[in-house]
Amino acid sequence: MWEFWVRSLDASTIFLIAGTGELYGQRSGILNVGVEGVMLFGATIGFIVAKTTGSYLLGFAAAIAIGALLGILHGFFSITLGGDQVVSGMGIWILGFGLTTYMGSPFTGPLGLDRIPTIFGLSPFFFIGLILAGIIWFVLNRTSLGLQIRSVGENPSVAEVSGISVSKTRYLCVTVSGMLMGFAGAVYALDYNPVWSYNFLLGWGFIALALVFFSMWNPLILLGGSLLFGTMWQLSLSPELVLPGVLSRYVWRMVPFAITLIVLLFMSTKRFRTRWGAARPEALGQPFLKEE
């Protein structure tokens, strides 16, 4: 039973780190629906580098670097060109889905390195995830930088007139956002499940994306949602450890995605928008082109 809870916390960590990255970008007004694609790149590049060099450190560094590059790429289309953010994000996901399959195929199989040491039986990344969530909350709510980010996400025109560079602020946010997504993918591939296979994330990025909306753009609520979904995911893998004989494991595998769909449908209702809509960044998904 203890192993079940440990694995649940490990899964929660990945949702938390990826979701925190997406939340940070969204608070500046940039929506990236390609979380899954960035995580796939981070997981695959991190896995390849770690396996060929024998270094976890280099593997994580490579994953974070590719995440930053993809964040900047998304920023180029969304900020510089003012393109549709959903289209850009979907393009990153499709690119990640196809290109990582080609790149990772020769490395199919286990990582082959000694497992990363635990802390009191827990993955060290669980504690890193908690620290990251706390830092993001502090930055967004207790610093002048956070005020700038929130201003840009709410009303970029007013922020620009006030002397805040909307472009620079958003580029900063999408870069950090991509770094955290790439890091989350590497945590999955190098620690949680160090065996590379075709499309091995199985929709984790989309769950992380839904968790941002579920959290009302609050890192602390995101932490709670990540713990909930991490537990549900592990329950879907090992239901016999908690509820032996209750439903098929294939039904349990559907539960996290079904709840994700229900959450998104509920958040699209008029009742939700009327009562909780203020939590959503006003300019989320809207391009801003500075008038000369």
Image (cartoon, rainbow, N blue to C red):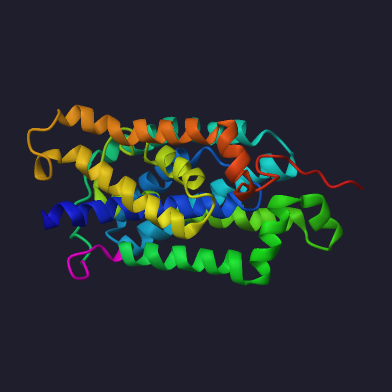
All told, the count of numbered labels is: 0
Residue 183 visible, this orientation: no
Residue 274 in which image quadrant: top right
Q: Tell me residue 118's x, y (percent).
A: 21, 66
Instruction: Single out the residue that lies furthest toward the left.
Output: 245
Indicate the position of residue 10 as horizontal and vertical percent values. Answer: 27, 55
Q: Residue at x 31, y 61 (%)?
A: 56
Residue 121 within the segment the image draws in magenta:
yes
User: Which residues are drawn in magenta?
Assistant: 118-124
- Name the side, left or right, on which 104 lies relative to 69: left
Q: Nearer the viewer, residue 266 or 282?
A: 266
- Who's the residue at 20% across and 28% down the image? 250
The main secondary structure of the magenta stretch is loop
For the point 36% across and 57% down, the residue is: 59
Q: Residue at x 25, y 62 (%)?
A: 123
Q: Position of residue 55 (x, y in %)?
A: 30, 62
Give percent across and percent down for residue 235: 20, 42
Query: In the visual, does 283 lie left or right of 220?
Result: right
Is 73 located above or below residue 218 in the figure? above
In the image: residue 239, left or right of residue 106 = left
Q: Quadrant of residue 237?
A: top left
